Image: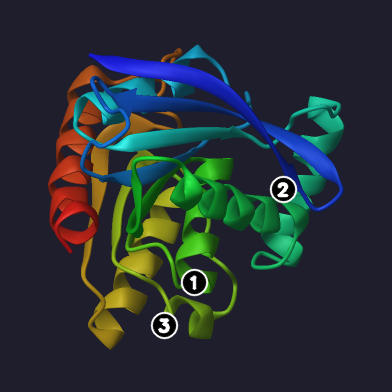
Amino acid sequence: MSAANEIEFMAEDRALRAYVARPEGLGPGAATHPGVLVIHEIFGLNDDIRRVADRLAQAGYVALAVDLFAGQNRAVCMTRMFGGVFLNPLEHQGARDTRRALEVLGGLEGVDAARLGAVGFCLGGSLAVALACTSDHVRAVAPYYGFNPRSPEALRRSCPVVGSYPERDPTRRQGEALQAALDDVGIPNDIKVYPGTRHSFANRGPAFDGVAAEDAWNRVMAFFDEHVAGG
């Protein structure tokens, strides 16, 4: 079971919202828990992303699922953010907002700020990889079908990565390139391409693949238990 609530915080000159899910019974005086930032895909902070946060809380993590589109036109915001992902992947507004959300997560009551991770889907997967390359406060990230920064040098600064990619999608090559770059400098990683799957195979929708999604989740949890919770 988990306990959840909504919060609001400032990021640069605007307010962002987030859904916070905590392990059941986490209260004053309780031991601190590791935290995981959950970064949504193009559909924003929806029930599917909230379920990811709830599931992390059930596994013993405090999860903060940020709404990067809060207070903005989603289509306009999404266009600008994807432009940033490809043109300035490490320093566009979405990347800065993601780092701010990680900071907020680390400051939540009951969270051990020295044990933080991030998981992201599509757009969020790209932001998770950018976070891995720019933040000293994240111990591991789990991108699902995201894009890498264009600079190979950026990936050399990454934290450990557990990535999940669909075979029938262009992001497959992103996963393969990410694995090669991390292997080249000895950064721990677990990158897997799932045969026969399509984009968004782990999110509820037409491309959902329950078998692949469950396998990916188990890999993420094992990796986070080693590199985030017990790192």
Measured in 3D between alpha carbons, the distance from the residue under mark 2 to the one under mark 3, in whole angstroms, is: 23 Å
Image disc number at residue 156: 3
Tell whether 111 sits left or right of 150.
Answer: left
Q: Earlier in the sequence, mark 2 or mark 3?
A: 2
Q: Residues within 10 Å of mark 1 (few under 14, many from 20)?
A: many
Residue 195 position by quadrant: top left
Label 2 or label 1, whichever comes before in sequence order? 2
Q: Residue at x 60, y 27 (%)?
A: 7
Q: Name the quadrant of the N terminus.
A: top left
Disc 2 + disc 1, Cβ < 8 Å: no
Residue drawn at x 26%, y 77% as measured from the top left: 187
Q: Quadrant of residue 18?
A: top right
Residue 141 seen from this side? no
Instruction: List x then y, in percent, for residue 17.
Output: 66, 29
Residue 127 lies, with reference to residue 69, above or below; the image says below
The residue that mark 1 highlights is 133
Q: Which residue is mark 2?
A: 82
Q: In which quadrant is the C terminus drawn? A: bottom left
Q: CA distance from mark 2 to mark 1?
A: 18 Å
Residue count near mark 3 (Cα–Cα under 10 Å), binned few <14, some 14–19, many ≥20: some
**Residue 112, position in %: x, y?**
32, 53
Q: Amino acid at mark 1?
A: Cys
Numbered circles on residues, count? 3
Q: Is residue 101 visible?
A: yes
Q: Say which residue appears at 25% left-offset and 78% top-offset.
A: 183
Q: CA distance from mark 3 to mark 1?
A: 8 Å
Q: Amino acid at mark 3?
A: Arg
